[in-house]
Amino acid sequence: MPNLFRGYCYPSLSDAANAEISLPAMPADDGVAVAVAFSALADDTANITYRFLLPSGQSDYILTRVYPSCSSVGYLTNYSGLELSDVIEVSFGIVLCWAVAFGFKTMRRAL
């Protein structure tokens, strides 16, 4: 089942978690945080281990991350959830309303 991370649906949970681990180090307090490992908990949940590198030493922090499931692999671009057939149906309804309004306006002018 594909999993979503940062707008892209990855083929599996491990691919999504690896994408997060491959991100560059992030500034954190007086040091930096680096994702170093993950362990899968379920089909859409993983524990990501972050290592905080501080001047006083290092410490690990485990973050539980949920990667939502997607319908297909690739960039998620249809946030509305509408299918093409729904869009076409609504578009034809709007065009029909405009055509009826124009017809009433034309008939009114004729009287």
Image (spheres, rainbow, N blue to C red):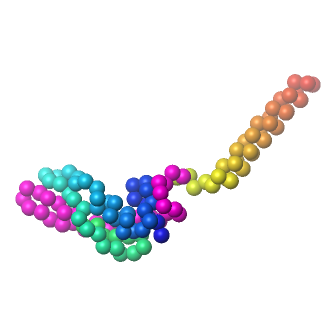
Q: Is residue 25 visible?
A: yes
Q: Which stretch appears magenta? A: 50-78
Position of the C terminus, as image quadrant, is top right
Task: Let me know if residue 73 is in the magenta part.
Answer: yes
Residue 51: image quadrant is bottom left
Determine whether 101 is above or below 54 in the image.
Answer: above
Please state if 88 lies on the left or on the right of 73 as rendered. Answer: right
Q: Nearer the viewer, residue 20 or 95?
A: 20
Residue 13 location in percent, x, y?
39, 68
Query: Residue pushed farthest right?
Result: 111
Residue at 14% in and 59% down: 53
Residue 89 location in percent, x, y?
72, 50
Residue at 66% in and 49% down: 87
Looking at the image, how many numbered discs can be counted on the residues? Answer: 0
Residue 44 location in percent, x, y?
41, 70
Please state if 93 lies on the left or on the right of 18 as rendered. Answer: right
Residue 38: image quadrant is bottom left
Query: Residue pushed farthest bottom?
Result: 41
Q: Is residue 66 visible?
A: no
Residue 32: image quadrant is bottom left
Residue at 20% in and 57% down: 33
Residue 110 location in percent, x, y?
91, 24
Q: Nearer the viewer, residue 36 or 64?
A: 36
Residue at 34% in and 70% down: 46
Please state if 36 lies on the left or on the right of 79 as rendered. Answer: left
Task: Let me know if residue 4 is in the magenta part.
Answer: no
